[in-house]
Image: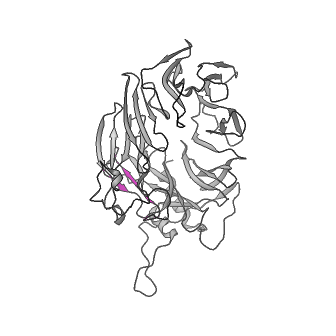
Amino acid sequence: MSLRMLGQLGVLTMVAAVLLTSCDNSGKKREASGSLPSTPLPVPSASAPILPSTDGNSAKEPSFMDLLRSNFNYVAQVPEDGFSYRDLKVARDGTIFLIGENDERRTKLLRYDLRSFRFADWQTVEGEIPLYNLQIASPQEEDEPLAMTAWGFSSEEPNFRSYVLTEEHIAEYRGIRVPSPDGSRAAVYADGRGGIWGIEARSGEEVQWTKGENDAQPLWLSDGSGFIFLKDTGEELGDGAGPNYSLAKYDIQKARTELLPFQQGFWGTVEWLEPGRTLLAHNGFDDAIGLKLVDLSSHAEKQLIQNPTDHRVQTASHNGRKRIMVAQRGSFDLYSDMGDRLSRVPWPADADEFTAINPEYDAAAPENGVPYYKAGLASPFGISDLTFKPDGSGVSFLLGTIGESIDEVVAGTRLFAAGPGGEEAYALTKDYLKIRHHAWTPAGDAVICLIASPERDGCFYLGVKWLDISLKW
C-alpha cells in the first residue's frame, strides 16, 4: 500500500478520532510509553484561513497548530520523553525512525508506524556513548531483523567503537567495522592494533590486511575482492590535520597494497559516487568546506569546492544518477561524474519578503554580502539539508535560517522541491517552521519532516507532505 493510500485512510480515520494533545504553554505533557497511539491532526482540504480578530480591525495571527495543519497533509505529535530529537531515517518499508538525545547523553531511537499511527520505543543506548553516522543497515536475508549501524567513542581504549542495534539488543565492537557487500566479512580499523584487519562474519577469524599505523576508511569494491582506503604515509600534516594520507587499493586474494597516483595530503571523509570507479573526498579542513572528485579509471582528480567557512554551502550526491549537486553563493551547480558542470540554476527568489535577491551581491566576492538582501551577515540564511529524491529525479532542501541565532531575521525554514538541477523550485510549505530535518519515503511520493515547536523546548512533531504529482520532474 502506498503512502498516499495510507494517508487517505488516515484522514478517514481522523474524522471520528479524538484530537491529539498539542504542545502549548499550559505545561501539560503527554506521557511516554512503550507504544503510543498518535492520531494525526485533521487537515482541511485547503489552507487554513486567517481567522478574523474580535475587534474586526486586523487578522488574527495563526497559531502554531494552525500552521502545522495548513502546511502538511497530516501531522503527528512526538511523545514528550525528555529527549531532544535531531534527525530521522526512513526504512525501505516506510517505517520512520527518530533519533534523539538527552542531557545524560543517552541516545534514543523512536519508531513511528504510518500504518497504525503509533510511536514505539525501539532502542535506547545507555551511558556516555555518543553515536555518530547512524544508518539503517541493508538486510542480507529476507528474514533478517531491521538493524541500525553506528560508530561512537568509548572512554576506554581503543576509543573508537562500532555498534549494531536491533530492537532486541545492542552489539558493541572494538574499532570501526565496514561490512563487505555480501556481509560475509568486515574490514576493521582504529581498533588499537594499527592497520586494517579482516574479520570473517561466521567464524570470527581475523587477519591483518594492511600495515600502516593509521590506515583508515576502507571503501569496498562491489565484488568484495578488495577495497580502496587511505594509507598512512608515516608523516604528519601538522596543525591538527592528522596523518598525511595516500589513496591506495588492497587486493585480498593477492594480499597486496597498490599506491594510487593521486595527491597526498588531507583527504577528510571519502565515499563512493560510483563504486569501483569514482569517489568523493570531503576534504575541507578545520571548518572549511571542500569536495574533491576522484576518477580511479582515468586517474583524474578535480577539486569541485574549496571554500572557507560558509554555512550556506551544501552538497549532495546520487549514486544511481552519478550526479553531484553543490549549492553555494546563490546557485545550484550540477556536476557529472567526470567533474563537468552540467548546469547552474539560481536559488529560489521572491518566494516571500525574506527571499528577495540582494542586488549588490557578487558571487565572486561572497565575503562582501549575502544572496538574499534581508539575511544580513550575523545570521546565516540560505539553503540547508540538501538531498536528492530516492530515484534522483529531483532534489529537496530547506530555505531559511540555518541554525538558531538571536540575530535571525526569521525563525525556521521552508521546504522546497526542485528538478535534478535545482530548476522549477516549488515550495512544499508556505510558512517558516523549525524543521530540523527532512527525508523522502522510499517511493519518493512524500517528504517526512521533523519539526520543533517554537513554544517550548522538547516538543516535536512529524509532518508528512505528499508530492504534487503534476510537477514535470
- Return the residue nearer the eye: 458 or 22: 458
Taking the spot 39% from the left edge, 40% from the top edge, the residue there is: 306
Task: Spot the residue most to the top.
Answer: 254
- Return the residue nearer the eye: 287 or 39: 287
Quadrant housing residue 317: top left
Query: What segment carries the magenta color?
Result: 410-431
Q: Where is residue 184 in the image (x, y as percent from the top left)?
A: 61, 23
Give the side of residue 136 with respect to residue 422, left or right.
right
What is the image's colouring?
one colour
Task: Spot the residue most to the front.
Answer: 238
Taking the spot 48% from the left edge, 18% from the top edge, the residue there is: 259
Q: Where is residue 367 in the image (x, y as percent from the top left)?
A: 36, 52
Q: Is the magenta stretch mostly helix, strand or loop?
A: loop
Taking the spot 48% from the left edge, 39% from the top edge, the residue there is: 285
Q: Where is residue 172 in the image (x, y as percent from the top left)?
A: 70, 36
* The magenta stretch spans residue 427: yes
